[in-house]
Image (cartoon, coloured by chain):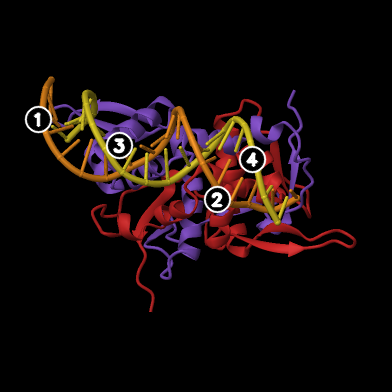
Chain colours: A purple, B red, C yellow, D orange
DNA sequence: CCGTATCCACAACGATACTG
DNA sequence: CAGTATCGTTGTGGATACGG
């Protein structure tokens, strides 16, 4: 990676979208709630139990994530059952998956001697799935082949 | 994504490498320090100023990140200058870049109406770079085309 | 089930001042 | 330049108990 970017610009803190993303999901519990959502968890108790966080924390994070549009809360009932609630990922929430997957992949590589307990596979062809940096021309990009540049203003 | 995974297994909390990764970089300041490292920052004062965190926090995070092997601290001197210190990404630290890039890409898409201030480009061909999920057969994978499975024990 | 209320502990952080 | 010391505030979270 080359520092072609002037680091003194106002972009750094004011507009940095990493910082903005971290404002939305900065806490451990938020990440773990989202992990569970990706794993298919939908109910309050399951979120708390599986992410191993207390109910008050689960309630707080779920409320925030709903408010920020990553999850939506929905009442539903199965035939002959009482009404229940569930939390489902929105498009905005689902689109965070690559970030979670990248964290998982890094943890698999560097923090677990067995390569991690969970594997991602392509449903159609069964092949393992990985997170990659790739350019529009189709090249896989290593971290040392990157240029950073200010994005030109659109319009 | 399909929940082909039994969510009650001990894997969830004990071995989950997302949780492990979050133990290493759970705080906002750790992410921002790493962002700066990727942007090319190497010196203490610059980390604090550019990530907009206080010196005590910068000192604490840098120490932890060095201890966990994401950064290394190094004395160096340029000719006729006094000795200085710098922090550089290790391979382990650099390998976290896809996670940062994924967060940035998500923030660019959902939290900034101008598509974000920073652009990643392939140095060789100049084309923009994106984070992707892709299977070993070469297919780009959407979040809804994933299967989760326990990874079989190796050996 | 799906939460809320209360209380408490500790971590994270900023501000400020200071040192080799 | 590269930090440490101190203080106060807020955030994050666990434990426990309780209510629709």
Q: Which of marks 2 and 1 is in front?
A: 2
| Residue B141 place in picture, x, y as percent | 50, 49
* Callout 4 crowding tier (Cα within 10 Å): few <14, some 14–19, many ≥20: many
For the residues beneath circles 1 and 4, the answer to whether they share a chain is no
Mark 1, residue position: A80
Q: Nearer the viewer, mark 4 or mark 2?
A: 2
The answer to whether the residue labelled 2 contacts the one labelled 1, judged by CB atoms less than 8 Å apart, is no
Q: Is residue A145 left or right of residue B23?
A: right
Number of marks in picture: 4
Q: Are marks 2 and 3 on the same chain?
A: no
Other-residue count near label 1 (Cα within 10 Å), few / some / many at <14 / 14–19 / ≥20: few
The residue under label 2 is B60
Sooner in the amino-acid sequence: mark 4 or mark 2: 4
Label 4 and label 2: CA atoms lie apart by 14 Å
**Mark 4 to mark 3: distance in Å?**
29 Å
| Marking on residue B125 | none
Calculate the distance from the C-alpha at mark 2 to the C-alpha at mark 3. Answer: 29 Å
């Amino acid at each position: 990676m080359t520092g072609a970017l002037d680091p003194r610009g106002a972009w750094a803190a004011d507009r940095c979208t990493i910082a903005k993303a971290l404002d939305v999901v900065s806490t451990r519990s938020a990440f773990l709630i989202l992990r569970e959502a990706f794993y298919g968890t939908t109910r309050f108790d399951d979120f708390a139990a599986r992410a191993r966080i207390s109910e008050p924390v689960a309630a707080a994070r779920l409320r925030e994530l709903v408010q920020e549009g990553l999850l939506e809360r929905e009442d539903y009932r199965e035939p002959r059952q009482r009404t229940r609630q569930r939390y489902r990922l929105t498009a905005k929430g689902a689109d965070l998956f690559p970030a979670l997957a990248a964290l998982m992949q890094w943890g698999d590589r560097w923090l677990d001697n067995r390569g991690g307990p969970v594997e991602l596979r392509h449903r159609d062809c069964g092949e393992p799935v990985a997170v990659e940096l790739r350019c529009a021309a189709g090249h896989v990009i290593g971290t040392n082949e990157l240029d950073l540049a200010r994005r030109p203003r659109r319009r």
